[in-house]
Amino acid sequence: MSSALYQSSLSSLPLLGRGKVRENYAVGEDRILMVASDRLSAFDVIMGEPIPGKGALLTRMALFWFDKLDGIVPNHLTGQDPLSAVSSEAEREQIRDRAMLVKRLKPLPVEAVVRGYLAGSGWAEYQKNGSVCGVALPAGLRNADKLPAPIFTPATKAEMGDHDENISFDKMVEIIGADLATRVRDISIQLYQRAADYALTKGIIIADTKFEFGLDADGTLTLMDEVLTPDSSRYWPVESYAPGSNPPSYDKQFVRDWLEQATVDGKPWGKTAPAPALPPEVIAKTLQKYEEALQRLTS
């Protein structure tokens, strides 16, 4: 496994922006070099310690899923070698195995979240009012229960350091229009269903996931960013799944659970930066979970 990359630094390309995990560089006017660092964010806070090799694992998994989901909706991949976008060997080494060369799109300002199971913020919201993002659900569901059918629960994209906010479908319609909102919803559920059905054959439950979409120069709706990685999805191993509590997971829920118990200056961490320092065993276990998920899905 390559040494950890906490933050890329490419002088040969203009930096467009840094996200929680990825850096985007402009390649001409119509392409972006998307570099997955080894940073980890939880509760929308970036941890101070990298997970070595995580960016390469995420990139492999995203490419795997783009291929599996082919035919449902166009995606942002150009098919071109990311290494061709930089000019020096030092920069090629920096991005090797952890970059995608993609089309430059106009991103939609909403995240397309699909839930097949009741978990996380969805479970918290259901406990309060029996619904998730305006979608009414049957009474008596438990934490981690499978839903009667997958539901679409959009969210607004947060600025760095802020929390994404769950919204209703009606609110999404206000933001991007009824036609586009309906297409995003229907396509997202179709993507989730195909991925979830496949993952089950490999012993993995995809409890929920989020997709991001953009429009190309012709206005074509296009799947973008990462897709179905443990950073954007909740992965549960089938053999240890039991409704009523948080199942063990292959995603960053392991880190979230540790952070829920962590203290700063003797007090519970308030889920704002800076995050508590991740111990070596938490870093190692997190990487192990990402590796096992990839190995299961692709074997």
Image (cartoon, helix red, strand yellow):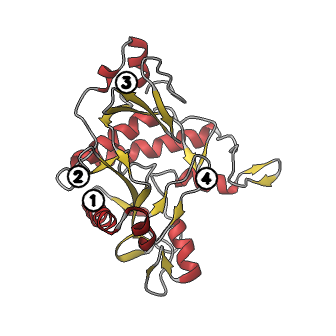
Dividing the picture into quadrants, the one containing residue 282 is top right
- Under tag 1, what secondary structure? helix
- In front: mark 4 or mark 2? 4
Residue at 26% in and 50% down: 219
Q: Position of 190 compared to 99: left or right?
A: left
In the rendered image, the vertical position of residue 34 relative to residue 70, given as above or below: above
Dot 4 amino acid type: Asp
Dot 2 amino acid type: Leu
Report the front residue among 19 and 149. Answer: 19
Which label's residue is closer to the chain start, 1 or 4? 4
The tag on residue 69 is 2
From the top left corner, tell me how far across and down residue 52 is, in percent: 50, 32
- In front: mark 4 or mark 3? 4
Q: Which residue is mark 4?
A: 162
Classed neighbour count for the residue bearing mark 3: other residues with Cα under 10 Å, few (<14), some (14–19), many (≥20): some
- Under tag 2, what secondary structure? loop
Q: CA distance from mark 1 to mark 2?
A: 7 Å
Q: Which residue is mark 1?
A: 191
Report the front residue among 250 and 124. Answer: 124
The tag on residue 96 is 3
Q: Position of 168 compared to 196: left or right?
A: right
- Under tag 3, what secondary structure? loop
Which label's residue is closer to the chain start, 2 or 3? 2
Dot 3 amino acid type: Arg
Q: Residue furthest left?
A: 71
Dot 1 amino acid type: Leu
